[in-house]
């Protein structure tokens, strides 16, 4: 039964105009492209019949870049010009290179640019340019297989890719000549592939362990509608890390210490990967390592030893699963299906630990290497307009709350974390001072109550505000998060129509560990944060009362107050000034009320005077 038809900008509405579309899984280790042909979503092979394209690019001084399997074969002989796992650098800044140095053993070019540039014999290149070469190869494969030009693609990204990483992916696609219908979280794409096959309502855990990233998503499937209840994971954990653990074991066994050069490390990683893959089928595997100078090392690695090596990394993924379940507000027992995605889920120990954690055998019906591309292809087919009665709706979520700074260094949250996207939310604010001509908008991300404890995303200024008394202007701040998770913020003064805004593209993003740290801190400091917020709110109110009182006294004090009345009001004012920095919100509130009580007659007289002045020269019936 068709429940819901979705349309997005650029989507075809002509029911008979079939448009060629593809889904692309742009992976850290491997990439694939898939399309819907004759109603069936399937991955597309190259001329040699290979479906998987290694995400590897080799640059040469005297020719075009080599992409895929051929480049991977050259990695050991030309390691510095052969770039793999480039996805780790997408959307990253130069400041991230220290933490990533162990994962990306390349030569980086010095310079003022905030974007890391990798030095190769063909010149300096960025991660976006390298990814564009991979996408260009996939585009050529798809157009050759489908016999025409692609109208657009859906590209998958890890669930925890931030704005900068998502934007970098779009930039790479544009360089490759691709029209991006939308970006899609990898676990969500897998849910599309499995959900359409099964069609039953319920809760699904998507465990996605690829070559370089791990994602866990808790989804609800209800009458054909997918909703992502919660996501978690680690953007720097995957099969590459498995290989590094095995390589480190080989180095220790071979007595190499930590002094292996780039070429030896490439060979070590190749041997480690081969051993890992072999141990999915056998209990023990022999390893031979060429140490150079006609020296060789031989040894054996058993599945039991492999399990011991990998258990700490697998445990990290299960800890993320635990957090995602907590965020979704569901128990493990409520999960109806566990979907395994990514080539690293072929490791027997991974399947064993995941089955034990969720209390049920995970589903591996679809090739875990292909399932994400298949789901992306299904979504691309819908967005191309080839299914006018398509019944698919995907609801992703934002990982951390978004808001702005208000007076006193407080954070006003406008979009809470785990809100489904795309979404737009607006809230009205006003000025603090009379005649205020501009307002600074500080956009923040996080769960804490104070600005200092949250992450700054952007700042912009709304200027040209009409001169009004404090509290009169109405300034609407609107947050928009699109289907790709990109954030835009606008501010508008409603009486004058003055506008300003910003599109947020930070130079680097948050690791999942950093998101987790921020969430944990918000829980641990919840009580202290609320107390601090209340204190700041009372201090801001005290400042407002003092400023308003001073302005009123300067204007009407001599005319409307006796000396005794003025003394009483000033005494209450001084008590409030002293109390404002006491750190006691109850005392500040009492002092504010004392000022309001002392000045109540003064306020009433000012009101009467203002009304009399306004009515002077007019009859009552004119009003």
Image (spheres, helix red, strand yellow):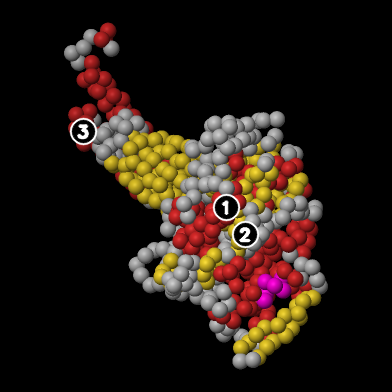
Vertical position of residue 518 compared to residue 20: above or below: below
The mark lying in front, picked from 1 and 3, is 1
- Tag of residue 144: 1
- CB of mark 3 within 8 Å of CB of mark 2? no
Magenta span includes 273: yes
Give me the C-alpha separation between circle 2 and circle 1.
Answer: 9 Å
Q: Is residue 200 left or right of residue 74?
A: right
* Quarter of the view holding residue 30: bottom right
Tag 1 or tag 2, which sits nearer the N-term?
Answer: 2
- CB of mark 1 within 8 Å of CB of mark 3? no
Whether residue 214 is visible, yes or no, is: no
Residue 497: x percent and y percent?
31, 32
Give me the C-alpha separation between circle 3 and circle 2.
Answer: 85 Å
Residue matched to label 3: 555
Q: Which residues are magenta?
A: 271-276
Is most of the magenta stretch helix, strand or loop? helix
Residue sitting nearer the eye, 206 or 578: 206
Residue sitting nearer the eye, 527 or 36: 36
Residue drawn at point x = 30 percent, y = 35 percent = 498
Residue 505: x percent and y percent?
43, 52
Residue drawn at point x = 44 percent, y = 36 percent = 427
Residue drawn at point x = 73 percent, y = 52 percent = 366
Vertical position of residue 93 compared to residue 483: above or below: below
Q: Secondary structure at mark 2?
A: loop
Residue sitting nearer the eye, 368 or 440: 368
Magenta span includes 161: no
Residue drawn at point x = 52 percent, y = 74 percent = 105
Residue matched to label 2: 47
Q: Residues within 10 Å of mark 3 (few under 14, many from 20)?
A: few
- CB of mark 2 within 8 Å of CB of mark 1? yes
Q: Secondary structure at mark 3?
A: helix
Residue 248: x percent and y percent?
64, 78
């Amino acid at each position: 039964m068709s429940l819901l038809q979705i349309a997005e900008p650029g989507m075809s509405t002509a029911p008979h105009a079939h448009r060629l579309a593809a889904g692309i899984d742009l992976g850290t280790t491997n990439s694939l492209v898939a399309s819907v042909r004759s109603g069936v979503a399937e991955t597309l092979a190259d001329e040699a019949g290979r479906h998987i394209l290694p995400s590897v690019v080799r640059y040469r001084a005297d020719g075009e870049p080599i992409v895929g399997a051929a480049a991977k074969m050259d990695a050991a002989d030309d390691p510095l010009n052969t770039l793999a796992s480039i996805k780790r650098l997408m959307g990253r800044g130069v400041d991230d290179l220290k933490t990533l140095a162990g994962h990306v053993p390349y030569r980086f070019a010095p310079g003022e640019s905030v974007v890391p540039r990798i030095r190769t014999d063909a010149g300096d290149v960025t991660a976006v340019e390298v990814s564009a070469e991979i996408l260009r190869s996939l585009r050529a494969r798809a157009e050759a297989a489908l016999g025409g030009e692609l109208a657009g693609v859906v590209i998958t990204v890890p669930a925890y890719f931030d704005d900068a990483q998502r934007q970098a992916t779009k930039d790479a696609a544009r360089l490759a000549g691709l029209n991006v219908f939308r970006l899609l979280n990898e676990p969500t794409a897998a849910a599309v592939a499995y959900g359409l096959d099964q069609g039953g309502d319920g809760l699904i855990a998507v465990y996605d362990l690829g070559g370089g990233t791990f994602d866990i998503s808790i989804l609800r499937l209800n009458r054909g509608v997918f909703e992502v209840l919660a996501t978690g994971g680690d953007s720097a954990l995957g099969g590459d890390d498995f290989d590094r653990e095995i390589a480190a074991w080989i180095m220790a066994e071979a007595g190499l210490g930590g002094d292996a050069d780039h070429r030896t490390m490439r060979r070590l990683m190749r041997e480690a990967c081969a051993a890992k893959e072999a141990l999915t089928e056998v209990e023990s595997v022999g390893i031979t390592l060429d140490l150079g100078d006609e020296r060789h090392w031989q040894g054996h690695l058993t599945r039991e030893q492999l399990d011991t090596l990998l258990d700490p990394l697998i445990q990290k993924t299960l800890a993320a699963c635990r957090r995602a379940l907590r965020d979704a507000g569901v128990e493990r027992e409520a999960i109806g299906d566990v979907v395994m995605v990514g080539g690293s889920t072929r490791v027997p120990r991974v399947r064993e630990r995941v089955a034990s954690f969720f209390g049920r055998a995970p589903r591996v019906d679809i090739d875990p290497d292909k399932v994400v591309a298949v789901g992306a292809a299904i979504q691309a087919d819908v967005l191309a307009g080839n299914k006018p009665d398509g019944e698919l709706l995907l609801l992703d979520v934002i990982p951390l709350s978004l808001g702005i700074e208000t007076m006193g260094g407080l954070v006003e949250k406008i979009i809470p974390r785990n809100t489904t996207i795309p979404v737009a939310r607006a809230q009205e604010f006003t000025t603090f001072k009379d005649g205020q001509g501009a307002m600074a908008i500080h956009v923040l991300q996080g769960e804490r109550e104070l600005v200092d404890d949250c992450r700054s995303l952007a700042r912009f200024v709304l200027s040209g505000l009409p001169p009004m008394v404090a509290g009169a202007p109405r300034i609407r701040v609107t947050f928009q998060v699109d289907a790709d998770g990109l954030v835009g913020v606008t501010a508008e003064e409603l009486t004058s129509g003055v506008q300003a805004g910003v599109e947020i593209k930070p130079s680097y993003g948050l690791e999942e560990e950093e998101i987790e740290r921020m969430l944990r801190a918000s829980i641990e400091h919840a009580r202290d944060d609320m107390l601090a917020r209340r204190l700041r709110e009372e201090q801001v109110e005290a400042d407002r009362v003092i400023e308003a009182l001073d302005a009123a006294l300067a204007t009407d004090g001599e005319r409307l107050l006796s000396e005794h009345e003025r003394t009483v009001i000033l005494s209450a004012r001084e008590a409030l000034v002293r109390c404002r920095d006491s750190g006691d919100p109850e005392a500040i509130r009492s002092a504010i009320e004392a000022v309001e009580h002392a000045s109540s007659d003064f306020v009433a007289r000012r009101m009467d005077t203002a009304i009399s002045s306004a009515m002077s020269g007019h009859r009552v019936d004119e009003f």
